[in-house]
Image (cartoon, grey):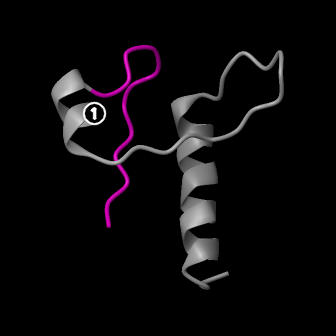
Amino acid sequence: MALLTGTEGEGLPPEVMKAVRTARIPQAPGLDSLNAGVATGVALFAIASAMGRI
């Protein structure tokens, strides 16, 4: 398993996006976006929780 994160703004290149299974972090209506660092932290927490590590 790997977690790939892109840059804020551009994200990951299209060729990478086509080659991987993607996931999204649900956000409340009106929330602009999460920065890359926060999104990575949320994703790592979710992965660790799903694996029973927390």
Residue 13 to residue 4: above or below: above
Towards the viewer: 11 or 21: 21
Residue 17, given in percent of the width and then of the height, sits at: 27, 33
Q: Is residue 43 left or right of residue 11?
A: right
Q: Is residue 6 left or right of residue 36?
A: left
> Dot 1, crowdedness within 10 Å: few (<14), some or many (≥20)?
few
Q: Residue at x 54, y 66 (%)?
A: 47
Residues in magenta, as a range: 1-12
Q: Is residue 9 left or right of residue 4?
A: right
Q: Residue at x 79, y 20 (%)?
A: 31
Residue 49, given in percent of the width and then of the height, sits at: 64, 74
* Local SS, label 1: helix
Name the quadrant of the C terminus.
bottom right
Residue 21, given in percent of the width and then of the height, sits at: 34, 48
Name the amino acid type tagged 1.
Met
The residue to which callout 1 is attached is 17
- Residue 51's quadrant in the figure? bottom right
Residue 46 to residue 36: above or below: below
Name the quadrant of the N terminus.
bottom left
10 is within the stretch colored magenta: yes
